[in-house]
Image (cartoon, helix red, strand yellow):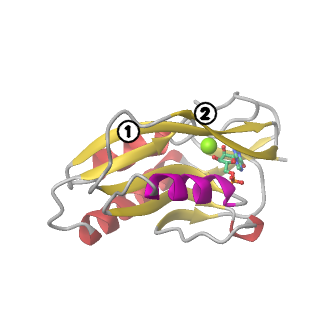
Amino acid sequence: MDNLKVMYEEEELQKRIKEVAEQIDKDYEGTDEIVIISVLKGAIFFTVDLVKKMKTPITLEVMQVSSYTGTESTGNIIVKKDLDNSIEGKNVLIVEDIIDSGRTLKYLKEYLQTKNPKSVKIAVLMDKKERRIVDIDVDYTGFVIPNKFIVGYGFDYDEKGRNIPYVGYLE
Ligand code: IMP
Ligand code: MG
């Protein structure tokens, strides 16, 4: 991809993800299971690296909730792929690649809360804090980033560039 500048190298990503994993393990100490809900497609990369660094036992669910075309959020949120198993009474951790307006995660958290889990927390790799439109608490954040469009390590530009191993930004 042309015009892609490095924002975070692979090593920086892994170092920070390790710290986040350690924080999660600390907070959930003694918990027998966390249900990780990875939000397709972008969060796959972060989810894999995060859970491999965690010691707390997990089960894994994947959901797909939003469509995002080009660089603009549509604001239309639908559940494209739902949970396979009940989360009733479970400790749930949503793992998402990025929070931007916050609409996706706000919708998803409220949706999951209707399924009566014991708890629902959110982990994101990237937070475009200045872009927030709706009010939503994030429990674990990898990096707070400026308002630039990022590509690589799961982040796509019209579905392209997800497998670039570092996080770059378009100029
Ligand atoms: P939100 O609902 O506005 O918070 O949007 C979150 C979604 O927007 C993420 O799941 C991404 O799919 C997408 N997104 C936001 N910023 C970027 C970016 O810089 N690169 C790639 N996808 C992005
Ligand atoms: Mg996404």
Front-lying residue, 140 or 83: 83
Q: Residues within 10 Å of mark 1 (few under 14, many from 20)?
A: some
Q: Residues within 10 Å of mark 2 (few under 14, many from 20)?
A: some
Q: Quadrant of residue 69?
A: top right
Name the element at disc 1: strand
Vertical placement of residue 52 versus 125, above or below: above
* 138 on left or right of 117: right
User: Which of the labelled discs sits on residue 164, or is there none?
Assistant: 2
Q: Does the magenta stretch include residue 105?
A: yes
Q: Residue at x 41, y 45 (%)?
A: 37
Q: Residue at x 25, y 47 (%)?
A: 58
Q: Position of residue 13 (x, y in %)?
A: 49, 52
Q: Residue type at mark 1: give it.
A: Glu
Q: Which quadrant is home to the N terminus?
A: top right
Front-lying residue, 105 or 145: 105
Q: Residue at x 65, y 39 (%)?
A: 78
Vertical placement of residue 135 versus 159, above or below: below
Q: Which residue is drawn at 42% across and 63% down?
A: 121
Front-lying residue, 171 or 74: 74
Answer with mark 2 or mark 1, whichever residue precedes in sequence.
Answer: 1
Range of residues picked out in magenta: 102-113
Label 1 residue near ligand 2, CB within 8 Å: no
Secondary structure mostly taken by the magenta-highlighted segment of the chain: helix
* 142 on left or right of 148: left
* 167 on left or right of 48: right
Task: Please indicate, yes or no, whether residue 72 appears anywhere in the rendered image.
Answer: yes
User: Looking at the image, do the residues carrying marks 2 and 1 touch, with CB atoms under 8 Å apart?
Assistant: no
Q: Position of residue 65 (x, y in %)?
A: 59, 40
Q: Where is residue 127 in the image (x, y as percent from the top left)?
A: 62, 62
User: Which of the labelled discs sits on residue 61, or is there none?
Assistant: 1
Q: In which quarter of the image is residue 52?
A: top left
